[in-house]
Image (cartoon, helix red, strand yellow):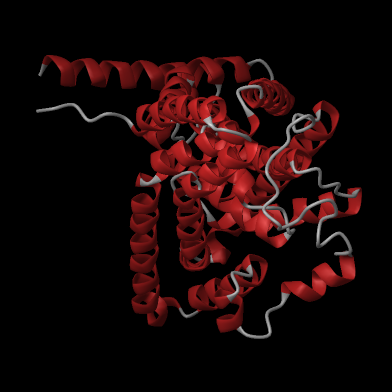
Amino acid sequence: MKKRIPAAAWIFGAMLLGVLAGYLINTCAADKQQAAQIADYISIASDIFLRLIKMVIAPLVFSTLVVGIANMGDAHSVGRIFAKSLSWFITASVVSLGLGMVMANLLQPGLGITLPDTGAGGGVVATGSLGIKEFVSHLVPKSFAEAMAKNEILQIVVFSMFFGVALAALGERGKTLLGSIDELSHVMLKITGYVMLAAPVAVFAAIAATVAVNGLGILLSFAIFMRDFYLALLLLWTLLVAAGFAFLRRRIFRLLALIKEAFLLSFATASSEAAYPKLLDALDRFGVKRKISSFVMPMGYSFNLDGSMMYCTFATLFIAQAYGIELSLGTQLTMMAVLMLTSKGMAGVPRASLVVIAATLQQFGIPEAGLLIILGIDTFLDMGRSATNAVGNSIAAAVVAKWEGGLLSEQEAQAAEQAIQAEAELKLHA
């Protein structure tokens, strides 16, 4: 059986080919105008990809968010754990988004990059006057159909939250409709997967068009972007471990040792979901009762994507900086609020952060074409943020278990781990 080439390899190869093609166009074209014309034709592929991304945003947010809320179960039976988990998730989300914003403003990774103006959002962001009053008023849709037609993500999120809560309240009567929406979410995930198959072509077109117009010098700036992002991720890891230490004390280092394999798996595959079984096993060995880990972990994959959320603010501000768009502090805080909401409906979506960023760029009048520039290096960034998501969810589950009295003592955990190892050896010999 032939081995499939990983998607990351296709994207990396497309990026290298794009650099080569762009360099050849830049050096062989008669003048800059001719290079720009050729780049314009090449960018048709990336424009189509962007439109496909926009096509799936609205139904994807609606279906995944409704299903996630409706499946939370009876609030009376799980309310306490849910409230404690949600309080941790919200705090972690604010810290992650805020850290991304602070680091992007401090490091200014987008400065010095000159991206071609697409006519959408040059100089001053179109929504710069979006204040608290306008933001709150804009939250509530006049019509759900209108919100879907215009891709008004915030309004779709608000309607989806009402819809999900009401659907959960119906109990058995709502199971049929919930099942249908769940099927819709799977269809949209499948469509998103199909769209992402075109990512290598879009990467090639985006990189080639950019290098054709700007030359090879622009690539250095993206190396700086990757360096700055991983520096920000390192700070986020430090904060997560420090928060875990505050509640778990020295046991946090034992937890980190146990999730090492899951961390590496999520990093290598660029998927935090791929490490889910390993994380549950590690939490069992650490002493977290399964009734807590099996509830908190799935919630975490919807509400606690720390690495992805930090990337959303960092990358969005990077694109704004690259286009020379100045965003006031008020606008950036509003953007954080937008990302806080929109990111909650994207669990399990391939390249979920890109979909969220695309929606945010559109919301704030920043050219979406900037998204395609970072798409070429997104695979390497996705590895870091996926691993961060896995670490954040593991620490969250352990802390909630500590709060709930569902965490075994060190001695009990060691005995449980020995029992798990003995059972595994029996299965191996059998």
Can residue 42 be seen at all in this image of the molecule?
Answer: yes
Which residue corresponds to the image point at 41% horizontal and 79% vertical from the top-left?
174
Front in this rendered view, residue 37 or 219: 37
Which residue corresponds to the image point at 68% horizontal and 28% vertical from the top-left?
240
Front in this rendered view, residue 144 or 306: 144
Can residue 64 be seen at all in this image of the molecule?
Answer: no
Q: Quadrant of the C terminus?
A: top left
257 above or below 366? above
Q: Quadrant of residue 91?
A: top right
Give how far across and how far down residue 390 sits, in percent.
Answer: 52, 32
Give how far across and how far down residue 245 sits, in percent.
Answer: 70, 22
Classify residue 119 as left or right of residue 191.
right
105 above or below 145? above
Classify residue 151 as left or right of residue 191.
right
Front in this rendered view, residue 16 or 388: 16
Q: Quadrant of the N terminus?
A: top left
14 above or below 327? above
Give how far across and how far down residue 332 sits, in percent.
Answer: 82, 49
> Of all residues shown, which one is farthest toward the bottom?
143
